[in-house]
Image (cartoon, helix red, strand yellow):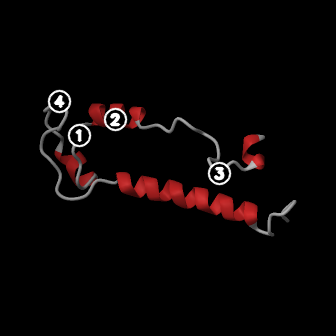
């Protein structure tokens, strides 16, 4: 049920688009290719178990944790401006 001039299902379309955008963003961050034996950032050896578990890995765990912390989204609301998501 949409309100005003919005068509039925418009809110669900916004939610679906937000979910698709988030999934696409995560997929772009998945490493590909062959794993490195040493971290790109600090040069420490990357354990064999990590290289097997994460194909295409390029960083050791501490460096990857720091990179992940820096890439956290600064916005935690629906960027399309849904009133419903802004009220929560």
List the residue tagged with mark 1: 59
Which image quadrant: the N terminus? bottom right
How many residues crowd mark 4 within 10 Å: few (<14), some (14–19), many (20+)? few
- The image quarter containing residue 65 is top left
Name the residue nearer the viewer: 1 or 81.
Answer: 81
Q: Are marks 3 and 1 in contact (CB under 8 Å)?
A: no
Determine the secondary structure under disc 2.
helix
Residue pictured at 20% horizontal, 59% vertical: 33
Residue pictured at 74% horizontal, 60% vertical: 11
49 shown above or below 32: above
Name the residue nearer the viewer: 9 or 49.
Answer: 9
Residue pictured at 14% horizontal, 32% vertical: 44
The percent coordinates of residue 22 (x first, y second) are 52, 54
The percent coordinates of residue 83 (x first, y second) are 77, 47
How many residues crowd mark 2 within 10 Å: few (<14), some (14–19), many (20+)? few
Nearest to viewer (mark 4 / mark 3): 3
How far apart marks 4 and 3 lie (CA) works out to 39 Å
How far apart marks 2 and 4 lie (CA) works out to 12 Å
49 shown above or below 20: above
Counting residues from the N terminus, which is met first, the one under dot 4 or under dot 1? Answer: 4
List the residue tagged with mark 2: 67
Judged from this view, the residue extending furthest toward the bottom is 8
Determine the secondary structure under disc 1.
loop
Q: Are marks 1 and 2 in contact (CB under 8 Å)?
A: yes
How far apart marks 3 and 1 lie (CA) works out to 34 Å
List the residue tagged with mark 4: 42
How far apart marks 1 and 2 lie (CA) works out to 9 Å
Counting residues from the N terminus, which is met first, the one under dot 3 or under dot 1? Answer: 1
List the residue tagged with mark 3: 80
């Amino acid at each position: 049920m949409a309100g005003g001039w919005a068509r039925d299902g418009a809110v669900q379309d916004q939610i679906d688009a937000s979910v698709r955008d988030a999934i696409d963003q995560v997929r772009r961050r998945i490493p590909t290719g062959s794993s490195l034996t040493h971290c790109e950032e600090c040069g420490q050896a990357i354990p064999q178990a990590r290289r097997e578990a994460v194909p295409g890995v390029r960083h050791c765990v501490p460096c990857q944790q720091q990179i992940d912390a820096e890439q956290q989204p600064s916005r935690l609301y629906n960027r399309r401006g849904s009133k419903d998501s802004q009220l929560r």
